[in-house]
Amino acid sequence: MIKTFLEGKSTYSIKSKFGNFLYDIDTSRDLPKENFFTHTLAKEALLHIYKKFEKNNLKFFLIFGTCLGAVRDRNFIKHDIDIDLGIYYKDKHKLIESISILLNEYEFKVLKISSEEESITVVYKNIIIDIGLFSKKKNYYIYNNFYENKMPQNFLDQLDTINFLGENFYVPSQVESYLKYQYGKNWKTPVPEWDYYNKYISTDMLQFLRRTKLNVKKYLKKVKEIRYKILMKSGLLHKNILNELNIKNIKSVQKSGQGFCDTYVIKANKSIVLKINNQSRFEYFKKDFEKIEPIYQFINYKERFLHEKQLFERLNCEKVKTIDNVIVFPFIDSKPLSNYIESVKFYDYLQKAIEVLKTKKVSHGDFHIDNILITKDSKIVVIDFEMIFSDYLSKTECFYYDIYYFFAKLEYQYPNYFDENYQKLKYFIDTNFTLEEKNNILKVAEKTKKYFFSVNGARVELFK
């Protein structure tokens, strides 16, 4: 596996929010432990990084096993398999520059880039180096964008230095307290069989997660039963509906969605999605929105259900039922488009979803990243047609509003992604819409901006 990696096979050139790098299939978990993490090579790798990061004024610090070895053993841990470094999130751009220098001047290659985890893994010869970003959230620093990987702020608000390999390296302040937090009170005792997969999580947190997992498993069945009983007892879902739909052997009832309806995903012999009218929520929306919002009309649930049934079937060729105050959709095994936001497939799927609206001549009203589903065979399914346009917009204007709304809400939901991928988004729009269409979108944006999302220059500029 090392040979395959070092020969550069399975290598792709990608663009990520960290910059443009070569990306290799993540082989780090398959690398053999024997004879590949040598202290000599590890020292070479870390000193190269020290030299270039220092020159670029990038403050980095030793963490996890690397910090433990430097403090306890004055060397790398004998049984370690990688080098662990941390930087502050605010220095991300310096990291990009420094990594580029390492790639150009030394035998470093990018092994893995994780936009989700906010981390980069590089390799020097056979030495793997994990570099993670720490961002401050309330009283903690979060590592790799996961709340479980948190570190009390007192360890990272200030940094201490220790002499290691002949240089002064930064480490968390109160470093012995940090190591106790990370590895427990017996941190001074080597543990050759340390759990690599949980190395980022402190001992106390790891024990807590294990207990939680056991408790969840223990009570999961009871929770499902309680939820189902509440659903039945509330009168929202009558047993005759389940009988009519031939729903048996219910495995789970999961509540989801925040629209006008209460949405339940029922997994059973026939898995279905139920949207049950919530009249009080509807009245709340109506009272709140009617004061400021002429774009949509608010009609009763039966008419809304009929509207949603017609559009869902027209776009997705799937049969939908309405029973009393419930609309019943077939369960579609899929993932929302938001799951692909960091994937190269994102723009392809988005283009197909827009084409569906255009070719079927359908106005959605709430066209956003979570209302576009992608099935396992890459089929596009558009859902949730609860919002019904009023005559404030013409039919043609409704389509342009859907497009404007998608990018407006994308910026609202994912501001960092929007900023960092602005040029890609603009290229997508320039490629998929004519000048006339972009001008029409701008007119609709101007016509509706005082009623909905506040508009800033960046979003409008997308269409110019």
Image: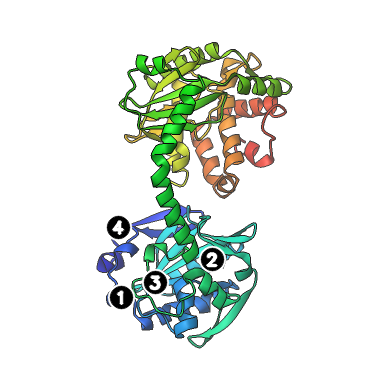
Q: CA distance from mark 4 to mark 2?
A: 25 Å
Q: Position of residue 310 (x, y in %)?
A: 45, 14
Q: Which mark is residue 166?
A: none
Determine which residue is flagged by label 3.
82
Instruction: Compare marks 1 and 4 and give the one earlier in the sequence.
Output: 4
Cα separation, mark 1 vs mark 4, equals: 21 Å
Between 437 and 229, the one lying in front of the other is 229
Q: Quadrant of residue 80?
A: bottom left
Of the pair 300 and 120, the residue shown nearer to us: 300
Q: Secondary structure at mark 1?
A: loop
The numbered disc on residue 36 is: 1
Residue 95 numbered tag: 2
458 up-or-down from 293: above or below: below
Q: Earlier in the sequence, mark 2 or mark 1?
A: 1
Q: Say which element carries label 4.
A: loop
Q: Is residue 213 above or below residue 340?
A: below
Pair 2/1: label in front: 1
Quadrant of residue 295 within the rendered picture: top right
The amino acid type, in three-letter code, at marker 2 is: Leu
Amino acid identity at mark 4: Ser
Q: Which of pointers 4 and 2 lies earlier in the amino acid sequence? A: 4
Name the image quarter holding the C terminus. Answer: top right
Q: What is the distance, in whole Å, between disc 2 and disc 1 at their CAs?
A: 26 Å
- Mark 3 secondary-structure assignment: loop
Residue at the location (48% across, 32% down)?
255
Task: Single out the residue that lies furthest toward the bottom.
Answer: 166
Q: Nearer the viewer, mark 3 or mark 2?
A: 3
* Mark number, residue 10: 4
